[in-house]
Amino acid sequence: MPRPELSQEQRDLGAALGHEIQERRADRSAASLAEAAGVRLDTLRKLEQGGTPTPGFFLVVDIARALEATLDELAGAARQRAGART
């Protein structure tokens, strides 16, 4: 059974999460964050560029941990960012 198509809101939230992660890493390189989170660099880049609208839970957990942020902080900031754009 195929997955249901994502709504525009879901795609906007995924893009907002990616932008939030990119902003929070500030002057830290993507490679440095990817290494600290234990994820592949291309996976992180795809997420930051909005190419992963529904990233896996544990991927986000690992990135949040490497950013020293909570899931609530990342999700709240992403929701606020997406709301400001829509």
Image: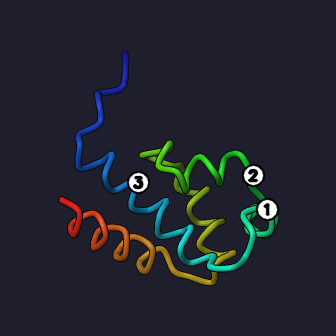
**Labelled pair 2, 1 in contact (Cβ < 8 Å):** yes
**Residue kind at label 3, given as amino acid type:** Ala
Label 2 environment density (alpha carbons within 10 Å; few <14, some 14–19, many ≥20): some
Q: Earlier in the sequence, mark 3 or mark 2?
A: 3
Label 1 environment density (alpha carbons within 10 Å; few <14, some 14–19, many ≥20): some
Residue 8 x, y percent position in the rendering: 23, 43
| Direction top: furthest residue | 1
Horizontal side, residue 28 vs residue 48: left or right: right
Residue 24 x, y percent position in the rendering: 56, 78
Q: How many marks?
A: 3
Residue 15's tag is: 3
Residue 62 x, y percent position in the rendering: 66, 65
Quadrant of the snapshot with the N terminus:
top left
**Viewer-side residue, 61 vs 42:** 42
Q: Tell me what residue is drawn at x 23 percent, y 40 percent.
A: 7
**Viewer-side residue, 71 vs 80:** 80
> Is residue 26 placed above or below 35 in the rendered structure?
below
Horizontal side, residue 78 vs residue 82: left or right: right
Q: What residue would you read off at disc 1?
A: 31
Instruction: Report, in whole angstroms, how far the alpha carbon at label 2 lies from the one at label 1.
Output: 6 Å
Element type where label 2 sits in the image? helix
**Residue kind at label 1, given as amino acid type:** Ala
Residue 35 x, y percent position in the rendering: 82, 63
Q: Tell me what residue is drawn at x 79 percent, y 62 percent.
A: 31
